[in-house]
């Protein structure tokens, strides 16, 4: 059943994936031919990715997989896992595209730079899960938890800005960095911690999704 749900996710979003692929190829060739740094390609392509994911989330309620989920004996866990497998596989393709760009067009691309690219990809996934939690809280009772969550996230961002604390992608002569985890100054530890953070957030997201006011209940 889970494999069928994952295939349904890809089938329902194949047009968006195709548009993402075409745009990535255009950016890849255009920026690469102009010898633009890898972080330029990463910045543009991740915006493209986030737009596609947002559109995917907005139209999900009108896609045939929603009717499939409602009609078949699909559990909350299966629905949650299928959706996130689709997103994570899509993000993995984006990370591989960044790696390929670096290998072809960046003379200084090495194992450490590849690790930085991976770390940025993990940071991007973290942002996606954080946003997903906020969206899923909209179907969680009591409803005010969503507003509390949004206000807390906004307050944290405001504190970071007021304290001149970087959040997101920055590039320098020393490489590509994803803040705030880069303050650890240990790439392996940053990657490990990113995986732990993603795992914890996904568990939290699942618990919220499982206990929300869903049509799967």
Image (cartoon, rainbow, N blue to C red):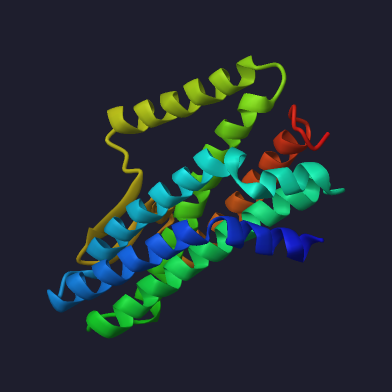
Q: Residue furthest left?
A: 34
Q: Quadrant of residue 112?
A: bottom left
- Residue at the spot 46% in from the left edge and 62% down from the top edge: 17
Answer with left or right where residue 176 lies relative to residue 183.
Answer: left
Answer with left or right where residue 10 lies relative to residue 103.
Answer: right
Question: Residue 93 at what x, y percent from top left?
Answer: 48, 70
- Residue at the spot 69% in from the left edge and 56% down from the top edge: 82
- Residue at the spot 40% in from the left edge and 55% down from the top edge: 49
Number of numbered discs: 0
- Residue at the spot 35% in from the left edge and 74% down from the top edge: 113
Residue 113 visible? The answer is yes
Answer with left or right where residue 163 lies relative to residue 120.
Answer: left
Query: Above or below — where is 87 with respect to 144?
Result: below
Question: Residue 125 at what x, y percent from top left?
Answer: 51, 53
Question: Residue 46 at what x, y percent from top left?
Answer: 36, 56
Quadrant including the C terminus: top right
Question: Residue 2 at what x, y percent from top left?
Answer: 78, 61
Query: Above or below — where is 72 with respect to 188?
Result: above
Q: Nearer the viewer, residue 173 or 58?
A: 58
Q: Nearer the viewer, residue 101 or 26?
A: 26
Residue 130 visible? The answer is no
Query: Above or below — where is 55 with respect to 10?
Result: above
Q: Nearer the viewer, residue 108 or 212?
A: 212
Q: Nearer the viewer, residue 64 or 126?
A: 64
Quadrant including the N terminus: bottom right
């Amino acid at each position: 059943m889970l494999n069928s749900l994952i295939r349904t996710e890809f089938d329902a979003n194949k047009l968006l994936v195709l548009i993402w692929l075409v745009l990535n190829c255009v950016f890849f060739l255009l920026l690469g031919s102009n010898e633009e740094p890898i972080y330029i390609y990463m910045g543009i392509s991740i915006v493209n990715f986030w737009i596609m994911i947002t559109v995917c989330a907005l139209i999900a309620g009108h896609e045939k997989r929603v009717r499939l989920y409602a009609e078949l004996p699909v559990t909350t866990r299966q629905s949650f896992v299928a959706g996130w497998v689709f997103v994570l596989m899509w993000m993995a393709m984006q990370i591989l595209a960044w790696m390929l760009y670096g290998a072809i067009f960046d003379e200084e691309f090495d194992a450490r730079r590849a690790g930085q690219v991976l770390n940025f990809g993990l940071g991007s996934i973290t942002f996606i899960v954080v946003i997903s939690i906020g969206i899923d809280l909209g179907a969680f009772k009591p409803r005010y938890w969503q507003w509390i969550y949004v206000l807390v996230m906004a307050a944290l961002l405001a504190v970071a800005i007021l304290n001149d604390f970087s959040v997101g992608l920055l590039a320098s002569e020393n490489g590509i960095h994803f803040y705030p985890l880069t303050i650890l100054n240990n790439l392996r530890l940053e990657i490990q911690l990113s995986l732990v953070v993603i795992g914890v957030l996904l568990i939290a997201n699942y618990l919220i999704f499982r206990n929300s006011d869903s049509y799967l209940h």
